[in-house]
Image: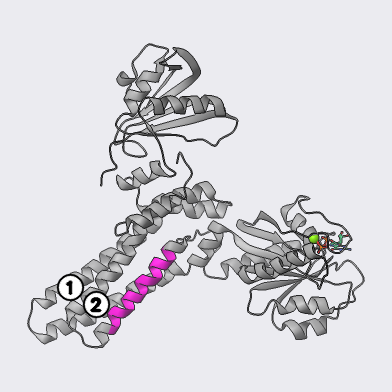
Amino acid sequence: MLTGDDTISAIATAIGEGGIGIVRVSGSKAVAIADKLFIGRTGKRVADIMSHQVVFGDIVDPASDETVDEAILIIMRAPRSYTREDVVEIHCHGGPVPLKKILDLTLMLGARLAEPGEFTKRAFLNGRLDLAQAEAVIDIIRSKTDASLKTAVGNLSGRLSAEIKHLRHDILRMIAQLEAAIDFPEEDIEEAAATDVAELIIKAKAEIDKLLATAQTGRILREGLATVIIGKPNVGKSSLLNALLREKRAIVTDIPGTTRDIIEEYVNIRGIPLKIIDTAGIRETADVVEKIGVERAKELVSQADLILLLLDASMPLSPEDRGVLELLSGRQAIILVNKSDLPPLLDFEELDEIIGSRLVVRISVTQGEGLSELEQTIVDMVYSGQVSQGEAAFVNNVRHADALRHTNQRLEDALATIEAGMPPDCIVVDLRSAWEKLGEITGDTVGEDIIDQIFTQFCIGK
Ligand SMILES: Nc1nc2c(ncn2[C@@H]2O[C@H](COP(=O)(O)OP(=O)(O)OP(=O)(O)O)[C@@H](O)[C@H]2O)c(=O)[nH]1
Ligand SMILES: [Mg+2]
């Protein structure tokens, strides 16, 4: 595939003040553009600089001959570059003004402003990366913990892609086997081929199931475990958020109804990113602002991966507590009995009757007790025996998981076709469609709309 011959340019570093900033230019005119705005201290022309060499010099506005900034220039000639096109990187001082001026110069000299993700899109279209690898690039940039980084880096290096390629290869071999059998008119040869293929399909399905088993953990590592803290007013929800964050983020007072809005923060719990939300205490209330907060809290509960429900050990269960406990039905939750440093008044037997086999952890946020047990409980829940801790998940992306599930469905169709004693060409139709579904992951068989959708999630300059 060709990417067109226009040359793109963008500021590749984050906007703001920094030690250095980088303007990146990619395309057939990249070197010519750099030649017009860069004067090397040795006087060497940009066009004469060897690929992958670093030169020091000045960025000079050709219209006014004014020096914009000192800079270092790196030229990476096609195909040995990120996009596989000619790429020039201009490393200048990391301020918004010099960066913007240098970017403007490149645009004036014939480059076009890059769209979000366009460098990586070109890398994909030019075969430098497959689609799963390109998606891993954004996952690396966005990774929230070491564990999420590890999965993303694994996928950039082609870990998932290798599995997918291997599965697609297996399916192609099955197709070939069936097609060879079609050429023989004897019934029993067709039947034998179908029996062979059925066995291979079962094997392939098992491999896909293995990949899918990592999907839930992978998604959590990538997006964060959506966690809400709920409980009646004053049980210590905001105190818990602060303790997990190890900073005083939310306001804590002894006045019930302190938190009125929703507070959302990322917390790193032993490598698992938690997108943790502190809510307004849930109770019947006449206060309009608080009421909205309570409604929102209920809504959040319905969307959460994990609910941390707080109770107060120093008080008997109240109707408010029972109301909050009712929200849990069918949801993954840990019940935290807080304030266990105070004289206990909570009736645990009564609680057990209501909650059955749900996990209960006794904590005291102010004393820092039970928090490490809570962290371990969360870790165990997330990994839940499917992926051993420390081993990175393969599938961390909903798109990939969906494609794998669909592939499995098509493989099941193929099995049903075999079961029904249909001729080999019917089995081949199902297998082809499974093969195509798998190809969506690596981008071998994917529509332009999906490609565009993926790359618009990137930042400009990536
Ligand atoms: N003794 C004791 N007090 C605690 C503990 N945890 C929190 N508190 C106190 O309980 C009070 C309420 O704490 P918050 O964290 O504001 O409670 P909240 O659930 O966020 O309250 P609302 O925002 O009003 O719903 C504060 O005075 C905290 O210091 C604990 O483990 N032991
Ligand atoms: Mg609060």
Mark 1 Cα shell of 10 Å, populated few (<14), some (14-19), many (≥20): some
* Residue, disc 2: 197
451 displayed left or right of 386: left
x then y, percent, for residue 200 = 28, 75
- Which is nearer the eye, 14 or 107? 107
Q: Is residue 57 magenta?
A: no
x then y, percent, for residue 331 = 64, 75
221 lies above or below 461: below
Q: Is residue 415 magenta?
A: yes
* Residue, disc 1: 177
Q: CA distance from mark 1 to mark 2?
A: 8 Å
Residue that lies at the very extreme toward the right in this rendered image: 343
Mark 2 Cα shell of 10 Å, populated few (<14), some (14-19), many (≥20): many
Q: Name the residue type under label 2.
A: Val
SS assignment for the magenta stretch, majority: helix
Q: Quadrant of residue 267?
A: bottom right
**Residue at figure coordinates x 89%, y 60% from the top left:** 254
Q: Is mark 1 within 8 Å of ligand 1?
A: no
Q: Name the residue type under label 1.
A: Gln
**Residue at figure coordinates x 88%, y 66% from the top left:** 341
Q: Quadrant of ligand 1?
A: bottom right
Q: Are marks 1 and 2 in contact (CB under 8 Å)?
A: yes
Q: Which circle's residue, 1 or 2, is located before the other in the chain?
A: 1
Q: Quadrant of the C terminus?
A: top left
x then y, percent, for residue 307 = 68, 69
The magenta segment is 400-416
Mark drawn on residue 186 = none
Mark 1 secondary-structure assignment: helix
Say if residue 192 shows up in the picture. Answer: yes
- Which is nearer the eye, 355 or 35? 35
